[in-house]
Image (tube, rainbow, N blue to C red):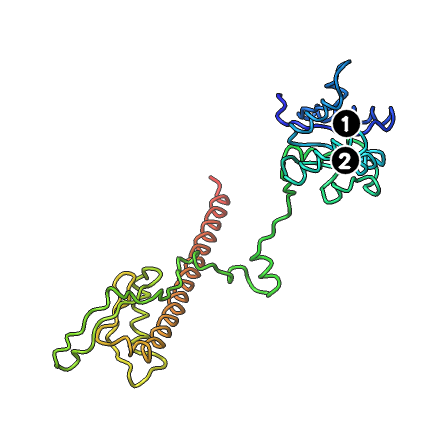
């Protein structure tokens, strides 16, 4: 499979053992579909190592900085070629033009250069079979780890805590119920009063926009509670309300009366209609469930009885 990720490894030649470890890291990365650029696989005799590092750092999108006490000392003190390298890395970090990942071999204490202390790093001190190496591969490849978690049925949890049956926990959509409420008055559809001096000529019709077109049965409940509200004022007018699709009309009133009197009665009638209609739907659903269970039990008895009759 073709490699599609590239990293540049930077380190200090602390010892031959350290160089061998860096080479082992590079080999493991390449086995995991990552192209690696570093001095041991890219330099030939006679090449300028400082020029190589300048080009490698400048073109890198992901840099693995193998941090050690010696590497920290060189970058912090800007020693020799490492000083120029350090300035380039600092610019990469500041400008976020490359991802710099500190890599350590046995703890972060006293090995991170000052410019890298706030960066996310990995500790490969336990080798390449450890979770930290998997973390490094995750960072380079840009993977997201979403560990699977056991999923509970929230209804089961609620029912257990409240000591009720799960069947008593309903979602309105499951019973085809939409809570109705008024979104506002449709000002452009408010009719004009006649104002011709006759009785009631100063009154007009006012439309109220609903959030949803109610079922016919809901409309019946609403009109019942509007005409017979549990609470009302002496200014209440029965039989002036009607419903057309998703609009409630009050015919023969004024905006002042709506504000002072009818608003509270509207809200009350809608609340009672929601309550009654939902209760009716729940009752119908439970009756259907009982009937379905009765039919299921009957079919099971039939099957058993048939099985017992042998010809």
Query: Is 164 in front, or is 199?
Result: 199
Q: What percent of the width, then of the height, locates residue 250? A: 25, 72
Proximity of marks 2 and 1: CB atoms separated by less than 8 Å: yes
- Tell me: 67 left or right of 153: right
Q: Comparing marks 2 and 1, which lies closer to the viewer?
A: 2
Disc 1 on helix, strand or loop? helix
**Mark 2 neighbour class, 10 Å CA radius: few under 14, some 14 to 19, many 20 or more:** many
Q: Estimate the x, y position of residue 67 in percent, counting from the top left.
A: 80, 35
Q: Residue at x 34, y 60 (%)?
A: 212
Front residue of 128/102: it is 102
Residue 228 image position (x, y, % from top left): 31, 78
Classed neighbour count for the residue bearing mark 1: other residues with Cα under 10 Å, few (<14), some (14–19), many (≥20): some
Q: Would residue 27 be seen by someone viewing this image from the given angle?
A: no
Question: Which quadrant, please, contains the N terminus?
Answer: top right
Which residue is label 1 attached to? 25
Q: Residue at x 77, y 20 (%)?
A: 40
In this view, 122 is above or below 252: above
Q: Quadrant of residue 271?
A: bottom left
């Amino acid at each position: 499979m073709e490699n599609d990720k590239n990293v540049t490894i930077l380190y200090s030649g602390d010892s031959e053992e350290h160089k061998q470890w860096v080479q082992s890291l590079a080999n493991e990365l390449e086995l995991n579909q990552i192209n690696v650029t570093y001095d041991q696989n890219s330099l030939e005799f006679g090449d300028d190592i400082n020029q190589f590092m300048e080009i490698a750092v400048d073109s890198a999108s992901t840099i693995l900085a193998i941090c050690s006490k010696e590497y920290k000392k060189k970058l912090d003190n800007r020693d020799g070629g490492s000083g120029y390298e350090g300035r380039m890395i600092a610019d990469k970090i500041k400008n976020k033009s490359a991802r710099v990942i500190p890599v350590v071999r046995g703890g972060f204490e006293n090995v991170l250069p000052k410019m890298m202390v706030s960066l996310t790093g990995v500790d490969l001190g336990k080798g390449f079979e450890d979770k930290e190496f998997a973390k490094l591969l995750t960072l380079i490849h840009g993977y997201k780890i979403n560990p699977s978690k056991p999923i509970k049925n929230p209804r089961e949890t609620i029912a257990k805590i409240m000591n009720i049956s799960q069947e008593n926990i309903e979602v309105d959509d499951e019973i085809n119920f939409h809570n109705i409420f008024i979104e506002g008055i449709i000002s452009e559809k408010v009719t004009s009063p006649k104002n011709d001096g006759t009785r009631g000529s100063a009154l007009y019709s006012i439309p109220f926009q609903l959030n949803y077109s109610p079922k016919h049965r809901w409309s019946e409940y609403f009109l019942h509670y509007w005409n017979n509200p549990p609470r009302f004022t002496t200014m209440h007018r029965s039989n002036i309300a009607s419903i057309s699709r998703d609009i409630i009309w009050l015919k023969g009133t004024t905006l002042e009366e709506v504000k002072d009197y009818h608003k509270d009665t509207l809200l009350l009638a809608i609340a009672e209609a929601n309550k009654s209609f939902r209760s009716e739907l729940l009752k119908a659903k439970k009756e259907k469930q009982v009937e379905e269970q009765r039919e299921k039990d009957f079919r099971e008895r039939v099957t058993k009885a048939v099985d017992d009759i042998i010809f």
